[in-house]
Amino acid sequence: MNINAGYFQLPTPSRVLRSIDRRRNPFCHRANATVRENSVEVRWTGRAEQALSQHSKPLVVEMQVYFTCVVKKRVLFYEQDKPQGTPVDERLNILFNVVESNSCDPVEFANNFPVKQVFSSPAANKMKPSALEIDYRNGS
């Protein structure tokens, strides 16, 4: 009998630890920003709040929908030389882009996430984020 194969499977230790961590470090800070004429709720933990307070310049967070062999959501953090995004507060700016991969090679995709272009078609412009959650754990 395989007790891990069904709907009523026992939780794995990593899922239990993640659940405990979320209870101890909730997303207690909130702000709203407007990206692509759409309201985005940004939530972050106390650990992220502490990390943000240590930056001298605003942190830029880029949300991406990344089209390659598969569709993937990515969140990138920039501390320098990235265009200003939509300000959330004086320490945090956000961007949203829909991008296409340079190739469909699985090894290249896993290692480098090559970007060929940013989509600006009407269909890509209809894609809009609704929420962003930020946590800072173990130096990242």
Image (spheres, rainbow, N blue to C red):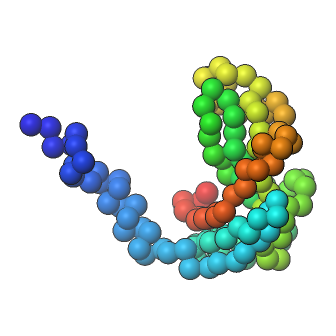
Q: At 48% across and 74% down in the image, what residue appears? A: 25
Q: Image height check: is 3 above or below 59?
A: above
Residue 117 drawn at (x, y percent): 84, 34
Numbered label tally? 0
Quarter residue 3 falls in: top left
Residue 40 drawn at (x, y percent): 71, 67
Residue 47 drawn at (x, y percent): 58, 72
Q: At 60% across and 31% down in the image, what residue appears? A: 70
Q: Camera-side residue: 48 or 134?
A: 134
* Residue 2 seen: yes
In the rendered view, does 92 fall on the left or right side of 42?
right
Quarter residue 140 falls in: bottom right
Q: At 38% across and 64% down in the image, what residue appears? A: 19
Task: Farthest residue to the top: give it.
Answer: 105
Q: At 80% across and 68% down in the image, what residue appears? A: 34
Quarter residue 118 falls in: top right
Q: Image height check: is 93 above or below 78?
A: below
Q: Image height check: is 66 above or below 136?
A: above
In the rendered view, does 100 fall on the left or right side of 46?
right
Q: Camera-side residue: 117 or 110?
A: 117
* Residue 55 seen: no
Q: In the picture, which quadrant includes the N terminus?
A: top left
Residue 90 drawn at (x, y percent): 83, 77
In the rendered view, does 103 fall on the left or right side of 9?
right
